[in-house]
Image (cartoon, rainbow, N blue to C red):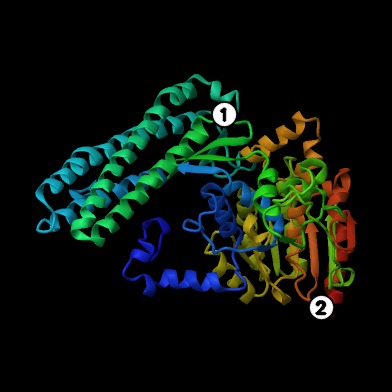
Amino acid sequence: IQSESDTTLRSKCKFYHECFFYNARRRAASADVLVANHHLLFADLSVRQESGESSEVAVLPKYQRIILDEAQDVEEVASSYFGAAASYHGILRILHRLYHVKEAKITGVLPFTMAKIQGAAGRINRSLIDKFHQQIEMVCEPAVGHVEFRLKDLMDQLFYWVSGKGNRSGAANGENFSEIKLRLTPAAVKDNTFQEMATKLTPALLKEMRQCAEHIGEVIKLCDIAEYQIGGEAASLAVDLNAQANRLLEMASKVEAVLLNNDEKNIRWLEAKESKWGSIVRLRSAPLDVAPILKKAVFEKFPTVVLTSATLAVGKSFDFIEKSLGLSEKISGALQDGKGRRIHKTATQLGSPFDFGRQALIVIPTDISEPNARDYPQQLRAGLLRALKISQGRAFILFTAYGLLNQMHRELASELAASGIIAMKQGQENRHRLLENFKRQVGSALFATDSFWQGVDVHGEALECVIIPRLPFKVPSEPVLEARVEAIERRGGNSFMEYSVPQAVIKFKQGFGRLIRRKSDFGAIVIFDNRIVKKFYGRLFLESLPECRIAAGNSDEVFAEMAAFYKQQRGN
């Protein structure tokens, strides 16, 4: 059950005052505090920016002050909502809502409209019914078919082109090669095949989509005339038709933005993969730099904005988050309100209530090979087994890639079971149930990736160890990361130290933060990546953590210290 703002009559609906959705909206509008996740907030902000603050299409009621928890995620979430996204199946869904024939069954708003008009034949004059018939069955329904044909033609061509040229997700880590991504760089768009699609297939599709929307607009005009004869029924039909026509136009704009817009301020890329539903193609774009957008849409617009998180600072500095979000005066200029008055900004780091020196031990085996070495997986396997036996399970093993996760789980599950440790794996069941089983079955080891690095609260004896196989650097071939790294290099900066390392440090701190959730908690953080002590940038990772005991050295020494730590903490 759902309510969509563009398919409702609002106050014209006879059920408006009893409507569950609008009653909920009214309660929200009268509330003093709204609680929303980042996605709802930035969906609302992006819609308001596009619509000129229209409350009719806004996702949230009006608000004046914002408190953003877990603010380290703002750049990524904002980038997705201030960009564009379109897909073959997304556009197809709109077309099928308009008109679809399957196994002799005809569905969609267009045939439904025709049926409703014919059903009201006694109240509508014959000439108007004939006009509906002509416009719907002779013009609009064929137009939907033309769009679908053009859409499949373009998307098939894009799929084969991306499949031959793109970067396969996870290739470096032995993962499933199902998803391929290709950034539309200046070099890529010069390719002859892409030029053919950009100059012929794409314009042809856009023309058909916009013409189809125009044809539907003519049906809406007929509904407006019919409203004088059959009242609200025609108004309801017009609203549904208008919603789908506008969605079709919106998708056309997004396709155009990704495939034809060469604006250097945006990152454009394509995603392709095979699935049980067939070939999937997505068209995506994101701002190269979201900072100026956030500065205007958030920080200079609202009188109070609070950013809070345990992982905003890199080392002892807020420089990275300030640069990323448009708060750095050196790069983005001073914040000013609508009247040109300077906006005050302050930043504070607060201490932790936990005694990390007593409650936590950082364990770093330095005699293990670097993560890219051929013998690293074999050494990691042995190290994981030792660490998990010492901690008696009760551990999160936080990976950065599914390939290594699956390999380690596959190779260790039976050996761990022989020691009474249940090896769980992300993906075996839904996240909530997996987490509940982990809490209940004390002595388990959960092999997990991205979504378990943050937003997970497990305290007590269920979680007494967090293992990080490798420092969480993002995959360098990801389109957004790749483009932002190149932009930093073009202006003479050091992208690794300015962007890649700070991002990894923040993610590392999130993983560390899973361990100590109460003053009574204790445990070890085991890091199987010796770059943290052997590379010059490693100190930034350790300096970003609270003061802890650190055991760094050969495996025998550090695991002996780890065993002694648990013996002392458990009193046995």
The image position of residue 230, as x and y in percent, is 19, 59
Q: Residue at x 14, y 58 (%)?
A: 120
- State whether residue 198 appears in this view: yes
Q: Nearer the viewer, residue 230 or 7?
A: 230
Q: Which amino acid type corresponds to the residue marked 2 in the rendered image?
A: Arg
Q: Residue at x 60, y 23 (%)?
A: 187
Q: Quadrant of the C terminus?
A: bottom right
Residue under the point 48% across and 39% down: 254
Contact flag, marks 2 and 1 (Cβ < 8 Å):
no
Q: Can residue 399 be seen by looking at this rendering?
A: no
Local secondary structure at mark 2: helix
Q: Residue at x 33, y 54 (%)?
A: 239
| Among numbered discs 2 and 1, the one appearing first in the sequence | 1
Which mark identifies residue 531?
none
Give the spatial CA distance, label 2 vs label 1.
Answer: 61 Å
* Residue holding disc 2: 570
Q: Is residue 398 above or below residue 285?
A: below
Quarter occupied by the N terminus: bottom left
Q: Amino acid at mark 1?
A: Asn
Q: Position of residue 49 (x, y in %)?
A: 57, 49
The answer to which image quadrant residue 154 occupies is top left
Q: Which mark is residue 262?
A: 1
The x and y percentages for residue 273 are 48, 41
Quarter-of-image position of residue 411? bottom right
Tag 1 secondary structure: loop
Tag nearer the camera, 2 or 1: 1
Viewer-proximal residue among 117 and 402: 117
Estimate the x, y position of residue 466 in percent, counting from the top left: 74, 63
